[in-house]
């Protein structure tokens, strides 16, 4: 990856409010190409609001958000074309096969049927799901559905992959499989990943971490550095003042 390549995602000085309630307060962070970055925060921290601003579901009126060098306000089309998104809620058509879902997504991006088939199979292979390409989504396990959604998000070959609490509701092994697949995409395909989570066991010591709490960034850096030789969960409690029983466990 060239040093001249722009960040997959660059956020600088972004704030957002809903009426008198400030959801985000001067948030800044970067995701480099090929880097897995964990956005760590409890429910209500502002993670989903930030994702909504990046994807243009909400309009950012302060600060700057760029995807692969494209400002999401001034060049929304090129910016959106460079991102793949997996939201917390399921979004595949359960009555279609995985391959049919990918083909439909390809059509939305102007990708022809034959090309969509090739790209789709390549994406499914990356998430170890090619052997289930003709299976209806309704027959898949929760982890397989998530991996199929990741494959769909990769179909148009984005530079940035956003995942908002992508493992919610999955069993431990399925969560591990999904996280492993995403890490492989970052290291093997050079995709920048912003992984929003509240689960500490999804974060490795070498991962870049952004701690978001009540709309503010409280810490940024390698997980091991933030943990300071101890447990990341303990450092998180110290930074946020949250109760490990009520919010962190």
Image (spheres, grey):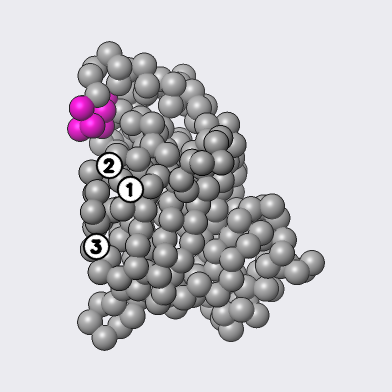
Residue 225 drawn above or below residue 152: below
Residue 123 drawn above or below residue 176: above
Residue 248, image quadrant: bottom right
User: Residue at the spot x=59%, y=66% of the render?
Assistant: 220
In space, the residues marked 3 and 1 are separated at their CA atoms by: 17 Å
Q: Is the Cβ of the residue at disc 2 closer than 8 Å to that at disc 1?
A: yes
> Which sits in the foreground, 103 or 175?
103
Residue tagged by mark 1? 70
In space, the residues marked 2 and 3 are separated at their CA atoms by: 17 Å
Mark 2 neighbour density, 10 Å: few (under 14) some (14–19) many (20 or more): some
| The magenta stretch spans residue 111 | no
Q: Is the Cβ of the residue at disc 3 closer than 8 Å to that at disc 1?
A: no
| The magenta stretch spans residue 109 | yes
Specify whether 78 is left or right of 236. left
Task: Choose the circle earlier in sequence order: 3 or 1.
Answer: 3
Residue furthest right as drawn: 229
Residue tagged by mark 2? 78
Is residue 123 in view?
A: yes
Residue furthest front as drawn: 4
Specify whether 166 is left or right of 232. left
User: Residue at the spot x=50%, y=72% of the render?
Assistant: 217
In space, the residues marked 2 and 1 are separated at their CA atoms by: 6 Å
Residue tagged by mark 3? 58
Residue 108 point in image, percent of width and height:
20, 32
Specify whether 198 is left or right of 69. right
- Residue range in magenta is 103-110
Residue 211 point in image, percent of width and height:
55, 68
Residue 238 point in image, percent of width and height:
65, 80
Mark 1 neighbour density, 10 Å: few (under 14) some (14–19) many (20 or more): many
User: Residue at the spot x=24%, y=62% of the render?
Assistant: 58
């Amino acid at each position: 990856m060239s040093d001249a390549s722009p960040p997959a995602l660059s956020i600088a000085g972004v704030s957002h409010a809903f009426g008198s309630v400030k959801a985000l307060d001067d948030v800044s962070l970067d995701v480099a190409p090929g880097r897995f970055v964990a956005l760590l925060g409890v429910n209500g921290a502002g993670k989903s609001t930030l994702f909504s601003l990046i994807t243009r579901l909400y309009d950012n009126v302060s600060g700057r958000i760029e995807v692969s060098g494209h400002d999401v306000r001034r060049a929304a089309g090129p910016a959106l074309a460079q991102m793949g998104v997996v939201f917390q809620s399921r979004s595949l058509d359960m009555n279609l096969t995985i391959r049919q879902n990918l083909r439909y997504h390809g059509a939305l991006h102007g990708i022809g049927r034959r090309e969509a088939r090739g790209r789709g199979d390549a994406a499914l292979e990356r998430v170890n799901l090619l052997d289930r390409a003709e299976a209806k989504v309704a027959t898949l396990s929760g982890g397989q559905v998530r991996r199929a959604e990741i494959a769909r998000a990769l179909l148009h070959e984005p530079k940035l992959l956003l995942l908002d609490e992508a493992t919610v509701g999955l069993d431990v092994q399925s969560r591990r499989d999904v996280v492993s697949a995403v890490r492989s995409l970052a290291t093997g395909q050079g995709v920048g990943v912003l992984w929003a989570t509240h689960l500490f066991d999804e974060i490795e010591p070498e991962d870049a971490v952004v701690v978001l709490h009540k709309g503010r960034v409280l810490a940024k850096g390698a997980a091991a550095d933030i943990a300071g030789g101890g447990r990341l969960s303990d450092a998180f409690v110290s930074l946020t003042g949250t109760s490990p029983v009520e919010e962190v466990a």
